[in-house]
Image (cartoon, rainbow, N blue to C red):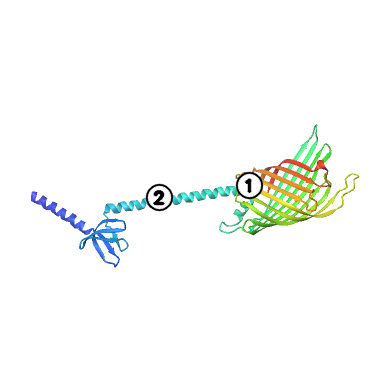
Amino acid sequence: MFPLARSLIALAALSLLAGAGLRADVLTLANGDKLKGKLVKNVDDMITFKSDILGEIIVPTTKAKVEVDLTPEQKAALAAKAAEEKRIAEAKAKEAAEKKKAEARQNLKLAKFNPIEVRSAAKAPRTTKVDDTGWLSRIELGLTNQTGRVETTSIYLRTENNRRTPKTETRFLNNLNYTRTNGVRTVDSFNSNLRFRRTLTGERLFAQSNTRYARDSVTSIKADVDQGIGLGYNIVSLKNLMLAAGTDAAVRYQSFMQKGTAARPPDRTSTIMDFFEDMSLTINPRFSLTQEFIAVLNPEDFDERKFNFNAGLTGKVTRTFNITTRLELEYYKADTVAEDQRYNQRIITTLAYVF
């Protein structure tokens, strides 16, 4: 039994040695020659290799490369490592895709607050550039009726039509304001403005055409019409914030109403300068803030000047109904306007319908 056992052990040892002899590292030289042996080390761009034929040799990595014959366990470990790296890469790609989708959903929520952008997204394919957003119309109405110690009736009506393309913006704005207190008409004005803007370079510099009409019975202005042309600059041009300023040169025509026994001022034509600034801010998907300021100066008479400031905070109730609280300040100094009628301030809350 013992000789047989010794024979079996010797046979197993020879099999292991034969298997070990079959596994060998391979060193490939720059000329294509290959040597079998064992990799000793590979550090500092130098390969130390023990060849079965030539013994130990040292060659730079620029002139040779070595292929290590791995054991099945080492190969399994490398395969597991590669699979883990692939899993991590796929997880990172999935996380990036989810983050991108979340950002797209957030941008869509912000766009829903701006009906113009909603129309653009609905009409145009995602891969094409929007050429025309169509008209966006808005009607605001504010009404006050008070009786008792003071009888007051106040009507505020504002209509706005906008159309935008990548290069142009057209806005048509009308504003009617009427107030009667204790039977006396204290406010009776109508204003209309047609503004056209076209981008000249990039998204910053633009040309502007402004046509304005105003009538105010309290200040005896029958017609105040001016046509201006000028330049503006988008100081800030972001997705949620727009800030622009510029100036116009305009020709103005004025006619006046007969008031009491005083002589009616003669009609007149003059050249004026307009300085404007406007801003729009999307606070969040539900609230937005708009603000406009214009200063009108008469180079022929520096004592004549007019300032208008308008700011409105809009809250979205539904897609088509909004509530706006608006602050309007007016100051008009001219020889045709009495001193106690030069300044006016209004805070108005309106319900708006957007279509």
Residue placed under numbered mark 1 in the picture: 281
Look at label 1 and name its amino acid: Leu
Dot 1: within a 10 Å radius of its alpha carbon, few (fewer than 14), some, or many (20 or more) residues? some
**Left or right relative to 271: residue 238:** left
Res. 184 in view: yes
Look at label 2 and name its amino acid: Ile
Q: Nearer the viewer, residue 96 or 214?
A: 214
Residue 32, image quadrant: bottom left
- Identify the residue at horizontal 72%, vertical 49% (top origin): 294
Residue placed under numbered mark 2 in the picture: 88
Dot 2: within a 10 Å radius of its alpha carbon, few (fewer than 14), some, or many (20 or more) residues? few
Q: Nearer the viewer, residue 307 or 227?
A: 307
Give SS at disc 2: helix
Distance between mark 2 and mark 1 Cα atoms: 41 Å
Q: Earlier in the sequence, mark 2 or mark 1?
A: 2
- Identify the residue at horizontal 73%, vertical 57% (top origin): 229
Give SS at disc 1: strand
Q: Position of residue 28 (x, y in %)?
A: 28, 63
- Identify the residue at horizontal 39%, vertical 52% (top origin): 86
Res. 1 in view: no
**Left or right relative to 40: residue 347:** right
Q: Position of residue 241 (x, y in %)?
A: 62, 49
- Identify the residue at horizontal 35%, vertical 53% (top origin): 82
